[in-house]
Image (tube, helix red, strand yellow):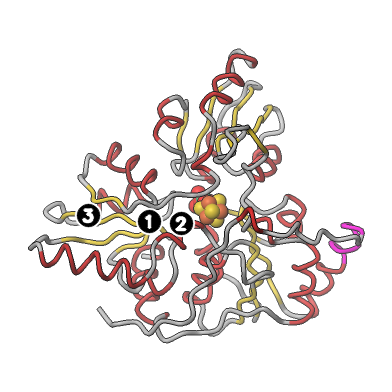
Amino acid sequence: MTTATLGSPLPVMDPRSFEADERTEEDPLDLMDEIDRLKKEKDATILAHYYVDGEIQDVADFCGDSLQLARDATKVTTGTIVFCGVHFMAESAKILNPEKRVLLPDLLAGCSLAESCTYPALKARQEELKAEGRDVVTVAYINTSAAVKSLCDWIVTSGNAREVIEDRVPKDKEILFVPDQHLGRYLVEVTGREMILWPGSCMVHEIFSLTDMRRAKKNNPGSEVIAHPECPQNILAESDFIGGTERLKQYVMGIEEPRTFLVATEAAMIHPLEKAAPRHTFIPVPGIMTDSGETCACNRCPHMARNTLQKTRDCLRDGKPEIEWKDYFDPAKEVLTRSLLQ
Ligand code: 13P
Ligand code: SF4
């Protein structure tokens, strides 16, 4: 595989050090109208992940999970894509559509999983395993930088991980799964494949409180827990349904009689769930603060929350910040295309 030249890495951020996001004083309805007008004027399409604020999802042309958005990006006919999500998602959209201008409302919208697995660290681990004589295939969750993707054999999302591992990774190979240890552990369970797991985790799912979840279950008799596989094993073990964001949505849509669901994933996910199946009640499972042990509203991803209506309008209007093409996007394109589009 080609050796990638590394660009400057995204700064590693401690979410507790974030300044309060400069929330807009502007009327959200005016901003939404302006965004609609600018989309036409600037020949742009907005893609939004289910974890961004509901009002941004409402102005987007495509909303979805990581897999669907990567696929939708290849169907865009306008010259510009505005990706309301996080850096690795906009980067993937650029890699799959080199001829398009791809904008991200805030370049600092990163991801704790992507930050946990750097290019040098992964390369060193792969070399270490090779030196031990182990024949390893590297499977990466899409929540990784393009430089890291360029070192990998397969890229998966929560929506296709099981089928890629079961149908496409040769049975005689060992798997090094990066960077989400919880998703990896879940995949070991459902596929029966042994995996070497990278010790990364999502800062949002990592801190869901089992005590709060049990309490919510007790207070809502007959409720069901639906959980994202980025949750730790103790949460998944007590969940009724496990799936990536799109699968969670399809699951609740398939249930006719009104029910209460306790939602163990990023809290903005409640918005598409309520839109898709308004007959149900959705209650977010709170997180727990790692320092104090208190429960909190930390089931919002601070990176996703960097996307605001105002920044979306600004980036449409100004044509920046833009994802610039890097030389290591070429090998990343090969593995992304093979894994997600074929
Ligand atoms: P999916 O929408 O693909 O399930 O991903 C969840 C996530 O954490 C994105 O950052
Ligand atoms: Fe990354 Fe977790 Fe935020 Fe998704 S929710 S972008 S996995 S930190």
Residue 157 counted in the magenta span: no
Q: Tell whether label 2 touches label 1 (CB within 8 Å).
A: yes
Label 2 Cα neighbours within 10 Å, binned few <14 / some 14-19 / many ≥20: many
Q: Secondary structure at mark 2?
A: helix
Q: Amino acid at mark 1?
A: Pro
Which label lies toward us, 3 or 1? 1
Residue 151 placement: quadrant: bottom left
Q: Position of residue 165 (x, y in %)?
A: 27, 51
Residue picked out by circle 1: 179
Q: Is the CB of the residue bearing disc 2 within 8 angstroms of ligand 2?
A: yes
Quarter in which the N terminus is drawn = bottom left
- Number of labels in the image equals 3
Q: Say which of 74 and 130 sits in front.
A: 130
Residue 298 placement: quadrant: top right
Q: Is residue 312 left or right of residue 168?
A: right
Q: Position of residue 94 (x, y in %)?
A: 53, 76
Residue 32 counted in the magenta span: yes
Q: Earlier in the sequence, mark 2 or mark 3?
A: 2
Q: Residue at x 61, y 61 (%)?
A: 85
Q: Is residue 65 among what the camera can see? A: no
Q: Position of residue 247 (x, y in %)?
A: 50, 42
Residue picked out by circle 2: 113
Q: Is residue 4 left or right of residue 173?
A: right
Task: Write the start and end of the magenta stretch as one range.
Answer: 27-33
